[in-house]
Amino acid sequence: MAAHRNPTERAELAQALRTAVRGEADFGTTARALATMDASNYRRVPLGVVFPRDADDVAAALAVCRAHEVPVVPRGGGTSIAGQATGTGVVLDLTRHLRGITELDPGSRTAVVQPGVVLDELRAAAAPHGLTFGPDPSTHSRCTLGGMIGNNSCGAHSVAWGTTADNVRALTVTRYGGDTLRLSRGTVPGALTGLPELIRTHLALLRTGFPELPRRISGYALDALLPERGTDPARAFCGSEGTLGVVTEATVRLVEAPAARALAVLGYADEAAAAEAAPGLLPHHPLTVEGMAADLVREPAGLPRGGAWLFVETGGATPAEARAHAERVLRAAGALHGTVVTDPAGQRTLWRIREDAAGTATRMPDGTEAWPGWEDCAVPPARLGPYLRDFRALLAGHGLRGTPYGHFGEGCIHVRIDFDLLSPEGVARFRRFSEDLADLVVAHGGSLSGEHGDGQARAELLPRMYGDELVALFSRYKDIWDPDGGMNPGILARPARLDENLRFEVLPKRPVDVAFGYPHDGGDFSAAVRRCVGVAKCRTARPAGTGVMCPSFRATGEEAHSTRGRARLLHEMLAGGAGGAGGVITDGWRSTEVRDALDLCLSCKGCRSDCPVGVDMATYKAEFLHHHYRRRLRPAAHYSMGRLPLWLRLAAPFAPALNALARMRPLAALAKRLAGIAPQRTIPVLARQTFTRWLGRHRGKGTAIPADGHVVTVWPDTFTNHLSPEVGRAAVRVLESAGRRTLLPGRPVCCGLTYVSTGQLDRARKVMRRTLDRMGGMLGAPVVVLEPSCAATLRTDLPELLPDDPRAAELAASVRTLAQYLEEYAPDWRPPRLNRPVTGQTHCHQHAVLGDAAERRLRERAGLTGELSGGCCGLAGNFGFERGHWDVSAACAEESLLPSVRASEPGTAFLADGFSCRTQLEQLGGVRARHMAELLAEGLPPEPGTSCG
């Protein structure tokens, strides 16, 4: 294949593709950077990315690439773990346009889908008919059917419904060059010249060369072409990892979904005991038999006693039948302890532990990085216990650690291992271990891949599993399909070495100079960016439950505006412009590509909690903006809203006059234009009397803590103080009813939020240090912070920007929300019984940093019923006010928040503790939402001579 790295040749190729396809052909820096990696250890830089609009576009693109001798790799959700979704030529991204469900026939229990359909979309379409697609990898909310076919994906329910290959009926496939074949059982297309002869002359080898086990994914499934197996070229195509052609349409089997499910959770002494128990449960026909050990579980989360667990799901026509099925499993399991969970919410909570394992396993309990590479070996289920013991011994022998988990019922084990892939010595050990582990798997009669494919991670070692003669047949099979070698070269047939193209080798060898402390990454920004392993939980169409991540991706559907996409761009920035060895982005912190991707990051911090590996894009964005605009002119919004505390403090004496001027449309329009505010926004009303002035008159300002201890410091955040003092007054009323006296710091303080969110980090640190000085003797006592975003800033950004100041950690540890304070320091206080429904939204920073368990309990005690929505309101501090962000801001609000308000019953209270959320509801929903403090204060009996309003 020609390299085509010459700019002229690349431009000619790009123009030819743009002329040939109706979809998009993007050879820009951002598109290339986003496609350099999947969820593996590998990185290959493409020439460009094509987004075909239909099957004709796929054929046209493949014809152009063949004419220009450029390799092609098809790509779905980009969650492949072995490196097969990366390439050096043209990437065909099938997720933008080719995502239709062409047909769904409940009678025949089949569906016809395009390759970019996300699995959960197919399952949602089938659900009203009582059907589902059986294979369900843990990435079900973002993996595509085309990717599942390419990898022959399996998932937790394969003990009941098999692999993807077991559920494919027919495929339409386009080869390199553009010709299209239809694959179905019983017939080999005539265009595959030489394939019948290849099978006929090697029958003995094909009949004896493949191990019989339920999770044999490695290599090409040539045994599916045997006459006694029905000569099924569609099945043989599954698992070919984009090396033969591109699926443009698939006919798949649907299965009956149980009307009810139950979950038996079984505890065992260790993982080997759990593994040995798993095969004995298969005669009970469970839907799943999943296993994991204690070293994967950071919090027990209601698991039964034990050092390892089996999750055994059962189905039934009724809840009682599903439960009885699970109880039979429990009695037969021989477990130390077990329980049956029938509550759907309880089951989801437990399954989330298992599904997030692909991410949580990338960090050892001590924070050490762990990586894929040997993610999914499989052995016969009866051999799993001995294999796990030998596997643990092999790890120890190489001085490595890992946390196995996976599909125990089918002998398939997932594991991330703490390889050192940054140093030559570590990479050499990675190779030695890989060779030894391949031999161990083969010795137990297993497959190097049991789910995710071989890719670059394992294909080099296939001769150890299959022998040279069968592997040579793999190459001949590849040549029959792809004689020009243009489809995903270096994967499966004639593979690249497992220790080349590693994505870490291009990163800086020394930590780059940064402002934040990155305490969980050893102060190394590169390590922080490396957290993103590509499992793409941020690329879901809807947040999981009350989750938040990633609102800008859901609003735009663009990879660049996902958490993963931004992490990829930062990786390429570090590789090319901050001391690295060769990334796609070459201008470092000055990169406009990174800036534009981060521009639509709402800094909601949702990824900090919802990402399985704790990527914190809000912090990375602040870091980038700090460097990007250093000694440069900033956007107007950074000077206006980024320095909001200063301007509001100066404006406070003139609030009535300024409010009157803001009501004059021409003046308001001019002010918004100068300040970089979206013209659709209404300027918030300034308080005529600030919260601090009111409280000074209400109680008198205290600066020392009285000996009786019945006092609490209330943080006078900018939003409460200048824009919604009614929240502060209500909180004082509630705290007084709980027998507390409220204090304020003696002088104005600020958490630095607006400076942080706009990347003005030098100024933020200055403000934070001044605040710590002014807190004085109040440090160490609990501080109630009413604005969740300010509380989150004090909890996280303050100690991470001032890591060497012990006062920062002390203040961070003192921060409490109102509900947290009341629960911890006034446990006997009884809130008023309000007995009314509520709707609204949990603030994204509260969800991500503070948690809302205390708030939930307080609402329950107050008789407030109903769930608050997840996601993000879309205003997110300055984000939704900035010019150019209106459409995304409104789209975020329309996802969950505004629909929940419209669906509310009469008499419902609208609850939102964040000023941004309340403002968004008022400006887009036309309703007045209130802080929890306000609702509680309204329910309190009036105090003679006291007013809170």
Image: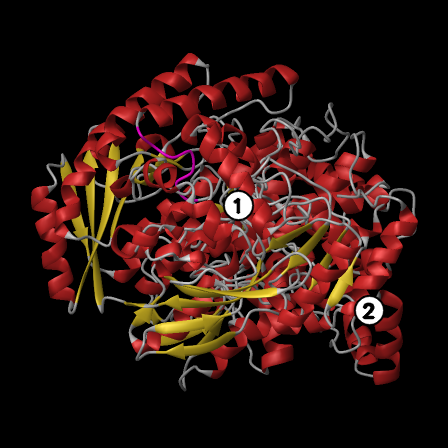
Residue 148 % position (x, y)? 47, 55
User: How far is mark 2 from mark 1, CA to CA?
Assistant: 33 Å
Residue 446 magenta-highlighted: yes
Residue 750's spot in the image, x, y percent? 69, 48
- Residue 491 in which image quadrant: top right
Query: Which quarter of the figure has residue 107?
Result: bottom left
Q: Which of 538 and 44 is in front in this view?
A: 44
Q: Which residue has dot 2 on it?
A: 19
Amino acid type of disc 2? Thr
**Residue 920 percent across, percent down from the top left:** 62, 72
- Residue at horizontal 39 percent and vertical 55 percent from the top: 165
Instruction: For residue 205, say whether it is visible.
Output: yes
Mark 1, residue position: 477
Q: What stretch is highlighted in magenta?
A: 445-451
Residue 54 visible in image: no
Residue at position x 82%, y 41% from top? 589
Residue 839 is marked as none
